[in-house]
Amino acid sequence: MARYLLSNLPVELNAVAEPLERLLATALGAKASCFRDPVLERRSLDARHKGRLRFLLNVSFESDPDFSAAPLAPGAKLETAPASVSFQVNAAPRRPKVVIVGTGPAGTFCALRLLDYGIEPILLERGPEMGERVQKVNALWREGTLDVDANAQFGEGGAGTFSDGKLATRTGHPAIRFVLETFVRFGADPKILFLAKPHVGTDVIRGCSVRMRREAQARGAQYRFKTRLADFREEAGRVRAAITSEGEEIPCDALVLAPGHSARDTFEMLVRHGVALRPKPFAMGVRVEQPVDLIDRAQYGPSAGHPSLDPADYRLVCNLNRDRAAYSFCMCPGGEVIQCSSEAGGVVVNGMSNAKRDSGYSNSGLVAKVNTADFGASDPLAGMHLQRRWEQACFRAAGERYGAPAMAVQDFLKGRPTGRLPRTSFRPFAVPADLETCLPDFVLAQLRAALPEFDRKLHGFTSVEAILLAIESRTSSPIQLMRGENGQSPSHAGLYPCGEGAGFAGGITSAAVDGIRVAEWIAQGAGAPVFEPFEKRVKSGDVGTEY
Ligand SMILES: Cc1cc2nc3c(=O)[nH]c(=O)nc-3n(C[C@H](O)[C@H](O)[C@H](O)COP(=O)(O)OP(=O)(O)OC[C@H]3O[C@@H](n4cnc5c(N)ncnc54)[C@H](O)[C@@H]3O)c2cc1C
């Protein structure tokens, strides 16, 4: 019996919960009993016409009758379903000693994939295990006390732990399916396998991280928490050992560097060693927040509140010229703006949501492109220094405490702080401030130019209920580590730059994919054959900020 894939099947909001057999029967003009084992492969929302929202489904199924001549809805397509890929591999002939720095998605998926090859890595994580980390983060959000090694950036699970848990990526890499299936295996809702915009939520992703670690430990990986990579030993251009914050030397054949974009002391250590890297553009700005109903009404029109619809998202872009653009980033429907600092004397904000997305607010990063020419210096860490300078300015504007300087959008547009703040989800506290003192002029100018355009595209975006909080500075890494065809640093053999901090990922899924990609390189070096399904579309440095 053949398997088919029907793509772009339009389905009304009220009909989306109907059995797939019935939807197929209506679409293809046959009896429901003709369709066996139907699987929903993808579901997206078609919101092009606000008065007539509908879902578009891709459904695979088996059937005897040939439907190739059946009339289809405009845009729909029927074809033979592609064969599914098995991700199983055999043990590698050799067992190199591997140390992985960081337990974010890049480090975690690198470890899980190495274990598939029988290679048992040691993972170093500067922050604590999940339970202790959550307590420290809650203390920051309740009382404003910061632990520089246990916060929303550092600790078990990496930055992804206190994230919104959106798993969408633009990379199109075949390992994405493997990543999503792995999240489901460790507790994520199986819906992420078909949603066009998969979302896990911070409450669920924390459990997934812990279960992934426990399985990795059971299969032979060693985890060392509260242990920072402080240095490494090199001989004749090759990495020989990782050196921890306790001064312990751990000999290794491969050192996987997946420390995320906030590991500033690690970046400084890499520069001291002359590791090949260069400054990289990123983006900087604020978080903008409005009530969830306002965004839903603007995006869904009369369908707002329909039970089949999740809180609405948006993606807004304003291209000012070839070098300048402002855009929304990491949009969190039904989420919270969070305190995300990791360095003493600096304030950083970001956004997250729980699986239910029921906070009553929606927020997003509203950021402007920061080009390397804006860094004001040519040293490799100039972008990092720029981030730090403005994070410190925000700390001062918040009264030298870990709150966040904030301003009503309308005051910001008029350039006149009134001290009035719209309601916000942000904890521990927002401080009325003049955001002129919190951001570079070129960022302020781009945000001021973009906001009225965003209000035209999304009605109410700049209403009296909209608030800005600063500073959203950790959008992506300010450096790019170089990587050769074999995944290793061209300056240091055995050093594998990986994930977002190294400039090879722009979100949870692409970081996880990059971790897998590095594991494949290490396994090939240990004599394993090339794993064709992941090899086909591998490109280096094909990822920017993307969620
Ligand atoms: C609040 C927030 C919300 C986000 N929301 C989303 C989202 O919805 N979707 C999405 O795709 N992405 C989101 N992201 C981004 C996403 O979390 C990152 O892209 C992703 O986690 C990067 O993975 P990584 O493994 O490369 O690095 P990280 O996750 O940053 O992990 C790096 C780890 O390395 C550790 N480390 C650093 N230096 C050292 C050292 N010297 N020694 C030992 N350990 C070290 C750190 O403690 C950390 O645990 C969000 C990020 C934040 C902060």
Image (cartoon, grey):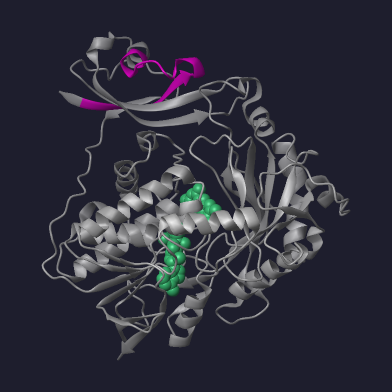
Q: Residue furthest left?
A: 93
Residue 361 sits in which quadrant?
top right
In the rendered image, residue 44, in percent from the top left (x then y), is placed at 46, 31
In the rendered image, residue 95, in percent from the top left (x then y), is placed at 16, 70
For the N terminus, the quadrant is top left
**Can residue 334 be seen?**
yes
Q: Is residue 527 above or below residue 11?
A: below
Horizontal side of 524 relative to 176 (left or right) equals left
36 within the magenta span? no
Q: Is residue 60 above or below residue 420?
A: above
Q: Residue at x 23, y 39 (%)?
A: 84
Q: Is residue 389 above or below residue 367?
A: below
**Can residue 339 be seen?**
no
Q: Is residue 75 above or below residue 238?
A: above
Q: Residue at x 85, y 51 (%)?
A: 419
Horizontal side of 49 relative to 184 (left or right) equals right
In the rendered image, residue 315, in percent from the top left (x then y), is placed at 60, 43
Residue 213 sits in which quadrant?
bottom left
Camera-side residue of 173 and 367: 367
In the rendered image, residue 518, in percent from the top left (x then y), is placed at 31, 64
Q: Residue furthest bottom?
A: 236
Q: Which residues are magenta?
A: 3-23
19 within the magenta span? yes
Horizontal side of 293 relative to 407 (left or right) equals left
Camera-side residue of 325 and 347: 347
- Report the number of numbered marks: 0
